[in-house]
Image (cartoon, helix red, strand yellow):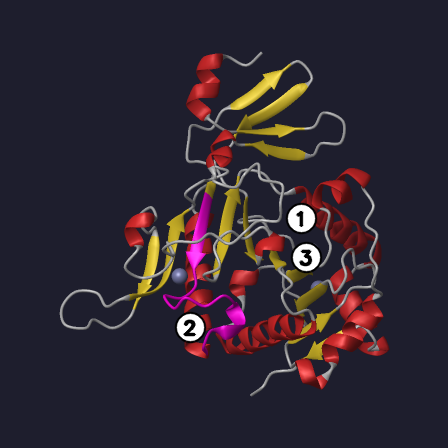
């Protein structure tokens, strides 16, 4: 048994499954969330929006913020804010490892933050103006650079949950950053697969996927000079969509300044296509990126967009095999429809 003293002090733990090596975060403070054990689809919270200007006192103080030009003296109003999650899954605590017989784990050290993308109360990233999304990207890249300096952290997961079916409880558009002392299993599996392909084929598997998809074309949604959007061959979910840089690069935050506007246009347009093709459907957006400091030249960063069309979360994971009711070829064809393209 772990000592009671330790449990109280650390509050949360990362534990590793002794059979398959899967990491889980056991985080009692998450249970304090108003809807944690409500199994009905999550509802959007009513009452004052904690992410709107004027309600800053409802959230913890900002870690980082980008402000507009000063109105008279001092800083102008904020444009993007990064705040600690009010119900963090990981916390800044003493880094301790846990070894007990066959079991191993460690204190759930890390940070869990919310990036409020705009002071305007809008629900989608696709509704942001070009200078607003540029601010979001600048702040995100800045924050990733700051997290890199904390040697205890290995990985920063960047994701967005949009809509109640995808687990969002606040509709005001925001992203989350979760920095962990371990590499999440999904990314670890991708790194291992990409490394083994690199060693046996002297090339990047993601570059090969892009090559193949551009040849076949039927799963390509959009193509721009530096980015490609596809519905992957073995999509797990209906309308699963990936955005990849066409040039081989493993670190998202090193994206050249000249590509950033194009990236944001492609991302916003892809979200808009999904929103128009699947009205009212929420989605999860996840950045799959290199670990914070390790150089992984065999990897290729990308964004995965996973619409939550009919996801029975617990069942799907328990079964261990995804059953997808929509062929990615059909999903891509639907998303390519000019009616779902950008209105501009
Ligand atoms: Zn709001
Ligand atoms: Zn590549
Ligand atoms: Zn991925």
Res. 218 image quadrant: bottom right
Closest to the observer, 157 or 171: 171
Res. 104 image quadrant: top right
Q: Is residue 279 above or below residue 178?
A: below
Q: Is mark 1 within 8 Å of ligand 3?
A: yes
Q: Under tag 3, what secondary structure?
A: loop
For image coordinates 45% across by 77% down, the residue present is 129
Q: Which mark is residue 132?
A: 2
Q: Which residue in the protein does label 3 denote?
A: 308
- Which of the two marks, 2 or 3, is nearer to us in this view? 3
Task: Tell which circle, 2 or 3, labels the residue nearer the N-terminal end.
Answer: 2
Query: What separation in Å lies between label 2 and label 1 (alpha carbons)?
Result: 29 Å
Residue 302: x and y in percent read 65, 62
Task: Tell which circle, 2 or 1, labels the residue nearer the N-terminal end.
Answer: 2
For image coordinates 77% across by 38% down, the residue present is 318
For image coordinates 84% across by 52% down, the residue present is 323
Provide the residue span drawn in magenta.
Answer: 112-129
Q: Is residue 17 above or below residue 322?
A: above
Q: In this rendering, does residue 275 appear at all? A: yes
Quarter in which the N terminus is drawn: top right
Q: Which mark is residue 187?
A: 1
Q: Is residue 232 left or right of residue 79?
A: right
Q: Are marks 3 and 1 in contact (CB under 8 Å)?
A: no
Q: Under tag 1, what secondary structure?
A: helix
Task: Tell which circle, 3 or 1, labels the residue nearer the N-terminal end.
Answer: 1
Neighbour tally class for label 3: few under 14, some 14-19, many 20 plus, Cα within 10 Å: many
Q: Is residue 59 left or right of residue 90?
A: left
Residue 248: x and y in percent read 67, 67
Q: Are marks 2 and 1 in contact (CB under 8 Å)?
A: no
Res. 22 image quadrant: top right
Neighbour tally class for label 2: few under 14, some 14-19, many 20 plus, Cα within 10 Å: some
């Amino acid at each position: 048994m772990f000592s009671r003293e330790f449990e109280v002090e650390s509050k949360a733990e990362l534990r590793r499954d002794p059979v398959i090596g899967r990491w889980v975060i056991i985080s009692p403070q998450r249970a304090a969330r108003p809807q944690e054990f409500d199994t009905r689809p999550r509802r959007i919270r009513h009452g004052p929006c904690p992410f709107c200007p004027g309600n800053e006192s409802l959230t913890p103080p900002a870690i980082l913020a980008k402000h507009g030009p000063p109105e008279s003296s001092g800083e102008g109003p904020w444009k993007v804010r990064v705040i600690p999650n009010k119900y963090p899954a990981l916390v800044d605590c003493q880094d301790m490892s846990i070894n007990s017989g066959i079991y191993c784990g460690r204190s759930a050290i890390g940070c869990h933050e919310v990036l409020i993308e705009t002071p305007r109360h809008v629900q989608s990233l696709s509704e942001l103006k070009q200078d607003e999304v540029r601010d979001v990207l600048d702040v995100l890249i800045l924050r990733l650079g700051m997290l890199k300096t904390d040697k205890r952290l290995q990985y920063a997961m960047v994701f967005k949950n949009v809509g109640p079916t995808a687990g969002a409880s606040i509709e005001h558009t925001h992203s989350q950053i979760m920095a962990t002392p371990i590499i999440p299993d999904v990314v670890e599996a991708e790194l291992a697969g990409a490394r083994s392909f690199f060693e046996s084929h002297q090339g990047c598997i993601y570059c090969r996927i892009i090559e193949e998809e551009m040849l076949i074309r039927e799963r390509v949604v959009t193509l721009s000079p530096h980015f490609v959007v596809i519905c992957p061959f073995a999509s797990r979910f209906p309308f699963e969509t990936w955005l990849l840089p066409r040039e081989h690069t493993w670190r998202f935050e090193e994206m050249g300044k000249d590509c950033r506007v194009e990236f944001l246009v492609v991302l916003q347009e892809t979200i808009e296509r999904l929103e128009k093709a699947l009205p009212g459907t929420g989605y999860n957006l996840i950045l799959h990126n290199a670990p914070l400091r390790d150089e992984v030249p065999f990897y290729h960063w990308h964004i995965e967009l996973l619409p939550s069309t009919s996801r029975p979360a617990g069942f799907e994971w328990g079964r261990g095999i995804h059953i997808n009711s929509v062929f990615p070829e059909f999903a891509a064809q639907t998303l390519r429809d000019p009616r779902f393209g950008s209105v501009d």
